[in-house]
């Protein structure tokens, strides 16, 4: 960790405390078991019932793919906790936030798994085998510096919120929609916390923060990308409009950059200015690529019609 990054983390301590207090005042506790339709559950063969068969699932293939990716991503919470605790520490306001965030995130995998097992939405044997493989592999932040971590989670929490919300809408199940909307509220509050801290970091050390933002915009990937079958599932999810390049550009990266007033700030030095130009160029490329995919999709629809 560089001396500059260490100094910024120390200077952010009061902002962390302010935003933690704001979060605790805003966040509304909820109970995962309230969102699970327990009356639809039945025993599996081990207890004298029947094991899962594909006909049991009320979900279409895309909804199953999206829920699988969302749940397995949430399952890696132990690794995420390790990474942010190592980056931000376990003492003071930072440590209090790490604990609060971890406890709130833990509800997500609990509720999603209970829903999918009770409704038999996904093969539970496949789900457990994939959970084991993905959690054993863990998640590695690749040595990100603290400001890079702050930038990354500002985008990633919003991306997760959008993915959960759109998955719920696409599920065709009112219970899943309600559950995922509730989880999305948590993710939004987490995004606001990290986004506010990154805004403060921009005021403290503009160039260092802007370079971190540049690194994470250009190199962004979802934390579950290394799970088995992620690419195939991601393609299906994108084609269904749950999370695609257009959504990533318009609903995740762009609004956060606007909040930070990245293209309006006048306090960057040479390094910060260069990083800002790189972000601007990259966003143009993403927009063009998203438009290209949209036009291809329209062309396919025209041919099929």
Image (tube, helix red, strand yellow):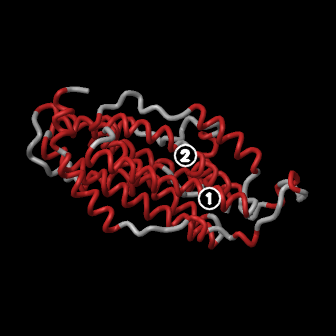
Q: Is residue 110 left or right of residue 97?
A: right
Q: Residue at x 23, y 35 (%)?
A: 211
> Quick one: label 1 or label 2, which is nearer the N terminus?
2
Q: In front: 197, or 283?
A: 197
Picture coordinates of residue 64, whole percent (x, y):
68, 55
Picture coordinates of residue 38, whole percent (x, y):
71, 69
Q: In this view, does 280 lie to the left or right of 7?
A: right
Above-or-below relation of 31 to 223 = below
Above-or-below relation of 4 to 100 = above
Packing grade of label 1 (10 A; few <14, some 14-19, many >=20) is few
Residues at marks 1 and 2, CA–CA distance in whole angstroms: 32 Å
Q: In this view, does 289 lie to the left or right of 46?
A: left
Q: Mark 2 points at which residue?
A: 73
Above-or-below relation of 131 to 255 = above
Please identify the residue farthest to the front as the structure is shown: 91
Which numbered mark, 1 or 2, is in the foreground of this view?
Answer: 2
Q: In front: 163, or 183?
A: 183
Picture coordinates of residue 175, whole percent (x, y):
63, 71
Quarter of the rendering occupied by the C terminus: bottom right
Q: Mark 1 points at which residue?
A: 301
Q: Residue at x 72, y 58 (%)?
A: 117
Q: Residue at x 22, y 52 (%)?
A: 260
Q: Report helix, strand or loop for mark 2.
A: helix
Based on the displayed image, in which of its 4 quarters is residue 54 positioned?
bottom right
Q: Report helix, strand or loop for mark 1.
A: helix
């Amino acid at each position: 960790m560089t001396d500059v990054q260490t100094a910024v983390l120390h200077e952010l301590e009061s902002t962390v405390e302010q935003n933690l207090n704001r979060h605790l005042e805003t966040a509304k506790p909820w109970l995962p078991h309230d969102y699970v339709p327990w009356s639809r559950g039945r025993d599996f063969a081990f207890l004298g019932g029947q094991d899962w068969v594909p006909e049991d699932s009320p979900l279409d293939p895309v909804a199953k793919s999206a829920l699988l990716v969302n749940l397995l991503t949430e399952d890696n919470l132990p690794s995420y906790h390790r990474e942010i605790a190592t980056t931000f520490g376990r003492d003071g306001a930072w440590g209090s936030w790490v604990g609060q965030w971890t406890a709130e995130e833990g509800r997500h995998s609990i509720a999603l798994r209970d829903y999918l097992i009770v409704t038999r939405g996904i093969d539970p044997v496949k789900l457990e085998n994939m959970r084991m493989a993905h959690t054993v592999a863990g998640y590695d932040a690749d040595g990100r510096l603290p400001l890079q971590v702050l930038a990354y989670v500002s985008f990633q929490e919003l991306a997760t919120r959008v993915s959960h919300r759109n998955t719920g809408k696409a599920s065709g199940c009112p219970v899943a929609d309600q559950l995922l909307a509730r989880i999305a509220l948590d993710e939004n509050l987490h995004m606001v916390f990290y986004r506010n801290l990154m805004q403060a970091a921009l005021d403290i050390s503009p160039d260092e923060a802007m370079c971190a933002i540049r690194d994470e915009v250009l190199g962004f990937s979802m934390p579950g990308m290394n799970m088995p079958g992620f690419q195939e599932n991601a393609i299906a999810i994108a084609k269904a409009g749950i999370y695609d390049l257009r959504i990533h550009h318009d609903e995740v990266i762009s609004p956060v950059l606007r909040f930070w007033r990245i293209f309006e700030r006048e306090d960057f030095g040479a390094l910060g200015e260069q990083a800002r130009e790189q972000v601007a160029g990259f966003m143009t490329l993403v927009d063009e690529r998203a438009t290209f995919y949209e036009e291809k999709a329209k062309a396919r629809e025209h041919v099929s019609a």
